[in-house]
Image (cartoon, grey):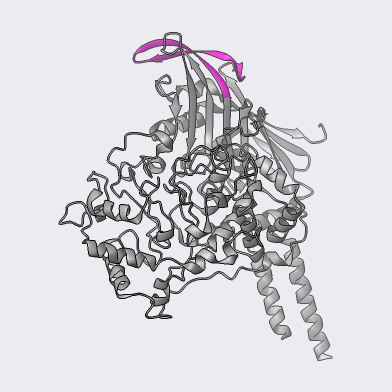
Amino acid sequence: MKKQNLFFAAIAALVFTSCEKTEIKEVEKIVYADQAGALSLTFDARYGESDFELNKKYPYQLVNSGGTYDMEFEFSRLRYWVSNVKLIDNDNKEHAIADSYYLVEETNEIAVQHLVNGEKYPATKREEVIIKDIPSGEYKAIKFSIGVDQKYNDNIALTAGELGSLNGMGVSDGWMWFTSYKFLTLAGTIHWAEGTPTSKALSWETGSNELFDGAGKTVELTTPLKIDAQNSGKVTFNVDVKELLSATDLPWVNNSISQNKKDLMIALRDTFLSKSLTFKEASSVSVEAN
Amino acid sequence: MHIAVRNRYIIGVFAFLVGLFVLLSCSKDDELPIADEEETPFAFRQPAFFPQAVESAIDPKTGLPSNPLTKAGVELGRRLFYDPLLSANKQVSCASCHHQGKGFSDGVALTTAGVSGKPLERHSPTLINLAWTDRGFFWDGGSTNLESQAFGPLTHADEMGMYLPVLVERLRADATYVGLFQKAFGELPSEHRTAMALSQFQRILISADAPYDLYRRGEQPDALSADQLRGLNLVRQKCSSCHAGELFTDNGFHNNGIDDDFGDGSHEGIYWGRYRITYNPLDLGTFKTPTLRNVMVSAPYMHDGRFKTIDEVLHHYRFGIKDTPVTDAALYQNNDKVGIPMTDQEVEEIKSFLHALTDEKFLNNREFSNPYNK
C-alpha cells in the first residue's frame, strides 16, 4: 500500500511539475535572485521631428503618382502589442522573457460602444515597459514582435503577461470582431481641404494569425547592454507615426484598413516594423545611481 | 529495524517530492489555498457512437487543456448562465435567449430580449453538444473556441451590453460568487474565469437520449416507428453531407442556397456568412450547419430565423434553393440540377423521424435548468 502511495505521490509530483515554462522561470529566479536586474523598454512616439500628441493637426504632404497634396492628420489613438521579447547575448544565445505581452498605447478616452451606463475607457498613455528579473549578462541585441501569437490570439480567455487582463480589453476596441487581438491600431481624422467631404475618419488596424508571421523585429544594440545586480538596462525606440502614414500612397482612399484588406494590413505592419519603429539608444544604468 | 529504515527512506523521498512540488509549483503569486473541489473532475459523458469530444484549448504554460471540467466549475457556470447580473441593466441573462425547452434557442427569428431592446442581427442558435464543436462558434464560426465566444454576447451592445471591468466589480462584491470562483478556480472572480465557467456549463449540455439514440444503442429496438425508420434512411441519404453522423451536423459551413445576392455587407455582414471572417470568396453566404437534434422544438430556422416551420425548410430544399456559384455542391441532387428531390410522402417520413430526435430528457434535465428556481 505504502509503495503505491509513494508511486502516486511521485506521479502527482511529475504532473504538478509539468508546467515547464513557468517553472523554469521560477528556478531561474531562485538562481539569479540576488543578481537579476531590470530592463526598461521605451517606445517614444514621434511625428517626424516633433513629439507625438493626440488631438493635434499635423501637416502631411502626400506625394504620389497623381501629384502633390497637402493634408493634415489628427490622431486619437495609437495602440499596439509588444510581445515575445528575447534578449540575445554575446554568444548569440537567445533568452526569452516568459509571458512578455505588453500593451503600448496613447489613446483618448474611449466611449464604450454600448454606452448603457456611460462607461468610458480612460485616456491612457503608456510608452515604457519595465521587465524585471532579467538574468545577469551582456546582451547585444533584442528581438520582439508586434502582435500576439496564435496560441493566445485564438483564445482571449487565456492569460499571460498583460493579455486577457482588463488592460485595454474591457472595451470591444481591443479585439477584432472575431474575438482575437488587434495587433496595431492607429485612429484619428484625415483633413484635406480639397476633399469632399473635407475630412474622413482614419482607422488602420492589423491583426490575424497569418500576419503574426513576419511581425518580428531584431534590433542590434550599438554597445552591449550589461544587466546584473548593479546595472539595469534601458533601451529607447522611436516610433515615428509620420513614417507609418507612408504605408499607402492613397491614405484618403484607404482611410480604413482592416481584415478585408489583407495587402494593406501587411503594408501597414511592414512599414511599422521597418520605417516607423527604429532604435534610438541603449544604456546600462547603475542601480545605485538611481 | 529494517522496516524503520525503509520507512525513513520513504519519508525522506516523500519530503523530497513535496519539496520539489513546492519549489516547482506553477503558482507564481501567493494565492489562497485551492479548495478540494477544484480537483474534483466533472464526470463527462461520452455517449456511445459519438466522436471524441473536443478538449478546451491547450494552455501554453502547462501544455494541458486550459479549462478542464470540474464539478465546481460547471456549477458556477450554470449559475452565471442564468444570472442577469451579467448584463448591463441586470435584466438579461444568457438564458434570456437560450431556453432549455427549445434546445436552448428562443423561438423567435431575431430576438429583442437584449439590453437595448433592438432586434439582433442573428437568430439565437441552439446550444446542443457543443463539446463536439470543433470548427468555430457563432453562425459564421468567428470564434475559435467556446471560451472566447462568451465575450461576444457579454459585451455586445444589443445583447448583454456588459463593460467587463464592471462585471468583475459586481462579481467581486458578491460574497457567494467570490466563494464559488475560489472553489472552482482558486481565484477571485475575473472576466476570463467567467468565460471559462460558462464554457464548462455549456460543454455538459449533451443531448443523446432521443428515441433515435435508444434505437441506435439497442436499448429500445422498437423506439422508432416504420415511418421514422424510413425517415432516418432518407435523412442519411439526402441530408447527411451536412447533417452528418451522430451529431447530425458536420460543424462545417455551407451555402444552402437561401440567398443569391452577397454584395450587401451591412448588418454585420449577414449576407456574407463566413466570408466575413475568412474573406475567401468561396465562403460567401456560408453558415454553420445546425444540428438536427431537437430540431422540432427549435423553430424558427436558419441564421436569421427566416423559416418559421420545418415545412418551410423542407420546401426550400425541394423547390427553393438558389443556384449560385457558391451554392453547396451537395444540394445538386436533382440530376446535377439544384434541389433535393423528395416526394410528399418522403417529406412526412423525414418529419416523422425528426421528431425522434427530440430528447425530452435533455429538454427537461434539472442539471441544465435554472438553479435559482428551486
Decide whether residue A56 is among the magenta residues: yes
Total numbered badges shown on the rendered structure: 0
Residue A98 seen in this snapshot: no
Residue A132 shown left or right of residue A270 in the figure: right
Residue B52 shown left or right of residue A290 in the figure: left
Residue A157 percent across, percent down from the top left: 59, 50
Q: Nearer the viewer, residue A24 or A178?
A: A178
Quarter of the image containing the N terminus of chain B? bottom right
Is B339 placed above or below A109 here?
A: below
Please report the residue visible at 40 percent of the width from the left and 45 percent of the height from the top: B304
Please report the residue visible at 41 percent of the width from the left and 72 percent of the height from the top: B211
Residue B359 shown left or right of residue B70 in the figure: left
Residue A265 percent across, percent down from the top left: 44, 33
* Quadrant of the rendered image containing residue B278: top left
The span shown in magenta is A49-76
Main SS class of the magenta portion in the image: strand
* Quadrant of the rendered image containing residue B3: bottom right
Extreme residue toward the left, this view: B335
Quarter of the image containing the C terminus of chain B? bottom right
Decide whether residue B295 is among the magenta residues: no
Residue B67 percent across, percent down from the top left: 59, 59
Residue B286 shown left or right of residue A23 in the figure: left
Residue B360 seen in this snapshot: yes
